[in-house]
């Protein structure tokens, strides 16, 4: 019946762990500070240890019914309160990630549009906005109008005004955008939304848990959160600079009821009334407990301490790149989420030489993409040294071109080119 793809007899834990460790050879090694995407490394052994213990405690718990787990319910309520205080929100939902936060914000916008008689509501974004908006639009039967960014990589408010039509329901600003790390003019875009009675979502998935402390460190940060007039919702990922484990993000909303995350309720099931606030059914407890733990472990002081390490790494990074002839940082990033571009060098070859030296730099259309975490403060000097050597090494044997972000795994195929 079952072919050889399915094991006949089970293996012992030690054998399995040996196999897994063999499989792990070649996995992205982020702990060494040689990777700059996917994982946000706080380099804090105390946090790591407590997160591991917490994960073990909640590995099997199911937050689908939060009333079965007082612990998870209380932690989730507190996470929502802490996040709301941070972003000036009225309410918030803990979701499984940035894409889900964005999906739920888009869903609220669609429902608002439909209530106004718009069959296929449209959302105006800047081309630098995360693909999660296009993905949500695809699932929800909505339209996306993507306007070009300005020469500084920021959204251009007048282009938003030009893109409005009778079906527009929401405008999107990023704080900052992923490709170039620049914060869009949130106040201006939110102002346009307000004038036209539209919703306005700020995507602070990457910046949300760093910007409050960045400002406290004296860095220039224009207003970007729900305190800005006209902003109606905001996404901020706990599993990025919140330093939680994967599977945690916040969708925060202000006083505008139209933007509020909507409960799904179904009462025609023999199984009873089913109520859910997010897209998943069964829901892992670990992300909830880990988010609570990270926030409680670090506190405002801890986030400030980690932000100052990121700032230190960023300062040295900028100085280092400036010292290399042929290489430059694209634009003027507001956070250390940036593109290394060619200023005369062969950037594709630099990426390959860096690969050979054991670094794992992501590729995007215009160059190499990096995100700095606290742990990178240990490696900036060697990174700069190797970048200089890679620029000096000249062209590589073959060109690789831009990479892909993400991938799909199926029965016959496994596409997982992420470099
Ligand atoms: C990471 C990110 C997202 C998507 O979040 P996921 O957690 O990967 O689903 C959306 N917007 C921005 C700006 C991001 O950096």
Image: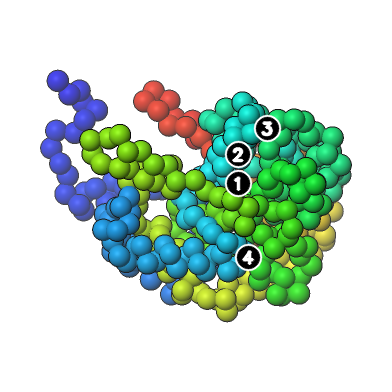
Q: Which mark is residue 202?
A: none
Q: Which residue does the numbered mark 4 point to in the structure image?
A: 88
Q: Which residue does the numbered mark 1 point to in the structure image?
A: 258
Res. 233 visible in picture: yes
Could you tell which of marks 3 and 2 lies nearer the N-terminus?
Answer: 2
- Spatial CA span between label 1 and label 4: 17 Å
Q: How many marks?
A: 4
Tell me if 131 is positioned left or right of 198 in this view. left
Q: Is ligand 1 less than 8 Å from the beta carbon at label 3?
A: no
Residue beneath the point at 74% across and 44% down: 197
Q: Measured from the top left, where is residue 98 in percent x and y?
A: 55, 48
Q: Measured from the top left, where is residue 389 in percent x and y?
A: 72, 53
Residue beneath the point at 52% across and 69% down: 82
Could you tell which of marks 1 and 2 lies nearer the N-terminus?
Answer: 2
Does the residue at mark 1 contact the one at mark 2 (Cβ under 8 Å)? yes
Q: Which mark is residue 122?
A: 3
- Spatial CA span between label 3 and label 2: 11 Å
Q: Residues within 10 Å of mark 3 (few under 14, many from 20)?
A: many
Q: Which mark is residue 112?
A: 2
Mark 3 vs mark 2: in front: 2
Does the residue at mark 4 contact the one at mark 2 (Cβ under 8 Å)? no
Which is more toward the observer, 191 or 155?
Answer: 191
Q: Quadrant of residue 143?
A: top right
């Amino acid at each position: 019946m079952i072919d050889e793809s399915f094991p006949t007899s089970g293996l012992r834990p030690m054998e399995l762990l040996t196999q897994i460790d063999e499989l792990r050879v070649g996995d992205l090694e982020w702990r060494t500070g040689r990777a700059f995407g996917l994982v946000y490394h706080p380099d804090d052994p105390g946090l790591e240890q407590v997160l591991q213990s917490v994960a073990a405690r909640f590995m099997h718990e199911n937050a689908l019914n939060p009333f079965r787990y007082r612990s998870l319910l209380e932690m989730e309520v507190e996470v929502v309160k802490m996040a709301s205080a941070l972003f000036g929100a009225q309410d918030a939902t803990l979701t499984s990630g940035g894409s889900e936060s964005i999906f739920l914000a888009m869903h609220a916008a669609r429902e608002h549009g439909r209530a106004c008689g718009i069959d296929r509501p449209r959302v105006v974004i800047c081309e630098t906005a995360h693909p999660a908006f296009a993905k949500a639009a695809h699932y929800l039967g909505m339209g996306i109008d993507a306007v070009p960014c300005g020469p500084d990589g920021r959204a251009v408010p007048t282009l938003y005004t030009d893109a409005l039509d009778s079906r527009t329901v929401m405008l999107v600003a990023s704080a900052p955008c992923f490709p170039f790390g620049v914060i869009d003019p949130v106040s201006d875009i939110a102002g346009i939304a307000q004038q036209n009675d539209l919703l306005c979502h700020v995507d602070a998935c990457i910046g949300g848990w760093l910007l409050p402390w960045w400002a406290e460190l004296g860095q220039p940060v224009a207003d970007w959160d729900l305190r800005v007039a006209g902003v109606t919702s905001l996404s901020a990922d706990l599993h990025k600079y919140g330093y939680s484990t994967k599977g945690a993000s916040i969708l925060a909303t202000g006083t505008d009821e139209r933007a509020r995350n909507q409960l799904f309720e179904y009462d025609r099931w023999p199984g009873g009334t089913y109520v859910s606030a997010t897209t998943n059914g069964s829901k892992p407890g670990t992300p909830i407990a880990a988010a609570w733990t990270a926030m409680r472990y670090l506190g405002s002081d801890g986030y400030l301490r980690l932000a100052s390490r990121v700032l230190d790494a960023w300062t040295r990074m900028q100085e280092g790149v400036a010292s290399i002839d042929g290489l430059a940082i694209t634009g003027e990033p507001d956070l250390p989420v940036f593109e290394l571009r060619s200023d005369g060098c062969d950037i594709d070859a630099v990426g390959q030489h860096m690969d050979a030296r054991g670094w794992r730099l992501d590729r995007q259309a215009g160059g190499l993409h990096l995100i700095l975490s606290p742990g990178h403060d240990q490696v900036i000097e060697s990174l700069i040294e190797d970048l200089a050597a890679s620029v000096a090494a000249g062209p590589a044997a073959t060109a690789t071109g831009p990479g892909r972000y993400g991938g799909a795994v199926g029965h016959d195929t496994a596409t997982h080119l992420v470099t």
